[in-house]
Amino acid sequence: MSRFHSGFFVSIFWFYVAIIRLALAYCPYVVHNLRYKIIFT
């Protein structure tokens, strides 16, 4: 039971790591896009 519990938390941890990495990879694109919109509106 405890082994399953720890595995569950590890999977959640890696899920969050993947989301954070995707967000960091996507963030410069979003910032660039917003800057582009602000300049041209």
Image (cartoon, grey):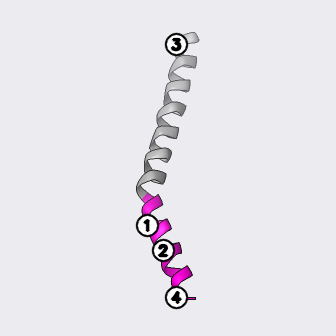
Q: Which residues are magenta?
A: 26-41
Secondary element at tag 4? loop
Mark 1 and mark 3 in contact? Answer it, CB < 8 Å. no
Mark 1 and mark 2 in contact? Answer it, CB < 8 Å. yes
Whether residue 26 is situated above or below residue 39 in the rendered picture: above
Q: Main secondary structure of the magenta part?
A: helix
Question: Where residue 2 sits in the image (x, y, percent)?
Answer: 57, 11
Q: Quadrant of the N terminus?
A: top right
Mark toward the viewer: 2 or 3: 2
Q: Amino acid at mark 4?
A: Phe
Name which of mark 3 and mark 4 comes first in the sequence.
3
Tell me the number on the disc at residue 33: 2
Q: Amino acid at mark 3?
A: Arg
Residue at image mark 1: 29
Whether residue 29 is situated above or below residue 13 in the rendered picture: below
**Mark 2 residue crowding within 10 angstroms, few (<14) / some (14–19) / many (20+):** few
Residue at image mark 3: 3
> Observer-nearest residue: 8 or 21?
21
Name which of mark 2 and mark 4 comes first in the sequence.
2
Question: Where residue 20 sits in the image (x, y, percent)?
Answer: 49, 45
- Whole-Å distance between the Cαs marked 2 and 4? 11 Å
Secondary element at tag 3? helix
| Residue at the spot 55% in from the left edge and 25% down from the top edge | 9
**Mark 4 residue crowding within 10 angstroms, few (<14) / some (14–19) / many (20+):** few
